[in-house]
Image: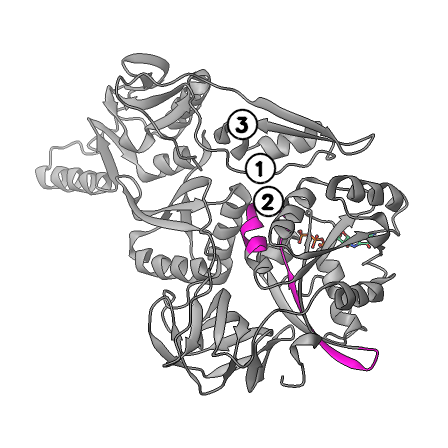
Amino acid sequence: MSRFPVENIRNFSIIAHVDHGKSTLADRLLELTGTIDKTKNNKQVLDKLQVERERGITVKAQTASLFYNCEGKQYLLNLIDTPGHVDFSYEVSRSLSACQGVLLVVDANEGIQAQTVANFFLAFEAQLSVIPVINKIDLKNADPERVENQIEKVFDIPSDECIKISAKLGTNVERVLQAVIERIPPPKVHRKNPLRALVFDSTFDQYRGVIANVALFDGVVSKGDKIVSAHTQKTYEVNEVGVLNPNEQPTHKLYAGQVGYLIAGMKDVTEAQIGDTLYLHKQPVEPLPGFKSAKPMVFAGMYPLDQSEYNNLKSAIEKLTLNDSSVTVHRDSSLALGAGWRLGFLGLLHMEVFNQRLEQEYNASVILTTPTVPYKAVLSSSKLIKARRAVQKNMIFIDQNRVMLKYLFPLNEIVVDFYDSLKSLSSGYASFDYEDAGYQTAELVKMDILLNGNTVEELVTVVHKDKAHSIGKAICERLRDSLPRQLFEIAIQAAIGSKIIARETVKAYRKNVLAKCYGGDITRKMKLLKRQAEGKKKLRKIGNVEVPKDAFIKVLKTVF
Ligand SMILES: Nc1nc2c(ncn2[C@@H]2O[C@H](COP(=O)(O)OP(=O)(O)OP(=O)(O)O)[C@@H](O)[C@H]2O)c(=O)[nH]1
């Protein structure tokens, strides 16, 4: 690795709106630099997770070191492929901290979309060099000149700086590599200073412990060095260092300006925090600023299917949150579902992907409850504050066919199915991005669900006043269909305070376990009654109503 002086190193990221072709461009760059075999049918090589391959989207940023010869000099190019979907923008902002420049990929047919704008500003704020790349010029409807004009108008980048390519066919991709060398500056680092390495990502390997992805800002790290974590102050010996090419390839050393991985016998997932600084033993340095913690937008309860699985699920969640540090975890418990956690996610897709990764990578089966969003409630007079609907903030015309609209929305209105409705209403043309605008006042009510007059704590929820009736009705109907009939009639009611807003009834049914037992043999009667009592233990009693666990799961998972 010493062959690469700092001036021959470029660290860059590919950013774009979802599906504009980042991963395909990354494949071509890996092929052009001989990192992967051109003859193979390479498709999204850096999308390593099963969930990424199944869904065809990137959810984790991935790093690859490319070796590239240009005009007699050998360059080391560290490429970070990032996700496009809004839920994973935290991955993007973290990746950018290890870069000096970005390739901003824009689809030649679709033009600038919501995440193109959001990701551009992440790079712009981080003061990175931006190389605009117009992709998919091979498409019949491609209009690269129109997209060039959009880029000039919205981002103030001269249109002659755009590189027009087809990542699929490989057209002009070599020009992208040349632009990386010419337009992105080498990292500003000092090799003579003591080691200062930023942990910008980490994964957990069952056999080797924590694998930390590091960017070296100062100094050198070698196999066998003693290093200290600024976060925990624990000391470790470096067992392995190397580059990702794109799989792990050990090297003896990593130098400032380089990006690679490091294994140092960290066995516990709490030991390698993303954003931590590593330095050499007895040579302490000022820690790097790290990362702003992610702000979860959507919360859901997670419980093991069976309580005996609690500890396994706990360890799986810990390992996965090491790799996805934007998830927040708090212990929680529910009378119906037992001990579990309340997890915070950046969006609904993020929640689904996390759940799928738990199942696929850790073989965990979980119950995930319907997502909710956080509210701040003023309880002084239990009358909750005035409502505010979506308010338009501004409207900007990007070109003749495209307009950017900004609205202030209650988070709860956009979190579940807004994105799908927007896509179907606009035949797929509209794209959507959001950011937190703080808490607003709204007319919210606390809705109770009652079984024969007794509140079911698990189903108490906060809803908007206007939606209380439809949600209450849906919960009552769902409960009616999942509650077994009992010896008496059950009234299922949704109530706001003392006002009942929806009601369903489950008719009485007498299961006479003694029916077959004519003849009056008392011991046989006792045996049957005992068996019936055992069956009831799996139920939860609310007042005099017995509720099987399944009924809660059905309601908690599907309504709202
Ligand atoms: N015609 C054409 N299709 C392309 C080109 N580049 C990418 N695609 C297609 O566009 C789709 C999306 O490409 P990806 O590379 O997965 O896009 P991405 O930006 O990485 O997507 P995310 O990782 O989910 O954000 C795939 O079906 C690609 O085959 C191109 O130059 N021309």
* Number of the label disc, if any, that sits on residue 77: none
The answer to the question of whether label 1 and label 3 lie on touching residues, with beta carbons closer than 8 A, is: yes
Among numbered discs 1 and 2, the one appearing first in the sequence: 2
Q: Quadrant of the C terminus?
A: top left
Name the residue carrying label 2.
86
State whether residue 534 is above or below residue 378: below
Quick one: label 1, few (<14), some, or many (20+) residues within 10 Å? some
Q: Secondary structure at mark 2?
A: helix
- Residue 70 in the image: x percent, y percent? 81, 76
Of labels 1 and 3, earlier in sequence is 3
Secondary structure beneath label 1 = loop
Give the image quarter of residue 161. bottom right
Would residue 82 be counted in the magenta stretch? yes
Secondary structure beneath label 3: loop
Q: Does residue 42 show up?
A: no
Q: Position of residue 332 (x, y in %)?
A: 30, 45
Count of numbered labels shown in the rendering: 3
1 and 2 marks in contact (CB < 8 Å): yes
**Quadrant containing the N terminus in the rendered view:** bottom right
Report the magenta residues as a range: 70-93
Residue 201 appears at what percent x and percent y? Answer: 51, 64
Vertical placement of 8 versus 61: above or below? Answer: below
User: Which of the marked residues, 2 or 3, is nearer the chain's N terminus?
Assistant: 2
| Residue 278 % position (x, y) | 44, 72
Q: Would you name the residue on which mark 1 appears?
A: 434
Front residue (pair 226, 549): 226
Left or right: residue 496 compared with residue 275: left
| Residue located beneath label 3 in the image | 409
Residue contact at pointers 2 and 3, CB within 8 angstroms = no
